[in-house]
Amino acid sequence: MMGGVTGTTPPPAPQPGLCAGCAHVRVVRSGRGSVFWMCERGLRREPGYLKYPRLPVVACRGYEASTATDPGTTEGR
Ligand code: SF4
């Protein structure tokens, strides 16, 4: 059968926009499988940046292209 509700699948993660390719992002995964995109500029309390920016980020003056193939991941609780 198709279309059943399983109740075990987390909702789809929001699209991160620019953060996905930014050198200042850190991906935080909770124990429940949720994904949070954390801005290290916001974490450092730089003016104008939020620790957890509203997604998707479509314009950001702090964006810098990342050279990493995968953003840093931190396990949350
Ligand atoms: S500097 Fe901007 S684009 Fe980069 S992680 Fe922070 S909010 Fe996202």
Image: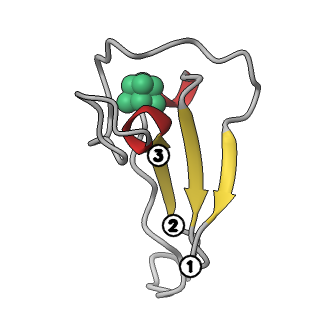
11 over 5 or under it: above or below? above
Looking at the rendered structure, the kind of residue marked 3 is Met
Indicate if the residue with disc 1 has its beta carbon within 8 Å of ligand 1.
Answer: no
Instruction: Say which mark, if any, is on residue 34.
Output: 2
Identify which residue is drawn at 59% across, 23% down. Answer: 23
- Dot 1 falls on a residue whose secondary structure is loop
The answer for how far apart the CA atoms under marks 2 and 1 are is 6 Å
Q: Does the rendering let one see residue 17?
A: no
Tell me if label 1 and label 3 are in contact, CB under 8 Å.
no
Q: Which quadrant of the figure has residue 39?
A: top left
Instruction: Say which mark, if any, is on residue 38.
Output: 3
What colour scheme does the image use? secondary structure
Q: Nearer the viewer, mark 2 or mark 3?
A: 3
Closest to the observer, 44 or 38: 44
Residue corresponding to mark 1: 32
Q: Nearer the viewer, mark 1 or mark 3?
A: 3
The answer for how far apart the CA atoms under marks 2 and 3 are is 13 Å
Identify which residue is drawn at 43% across, 44% down. Answer: 43
Looking at the rendered structure, the kind of residue marked 1 is Arg
In the picture, the quarter occupied by the N terminus is bottom right
49 over 22 or under it: above or below? below
Residue 52 position, x and y percent, is: 35, 48
Residue 40 position, x and y percent, is: 49, 37
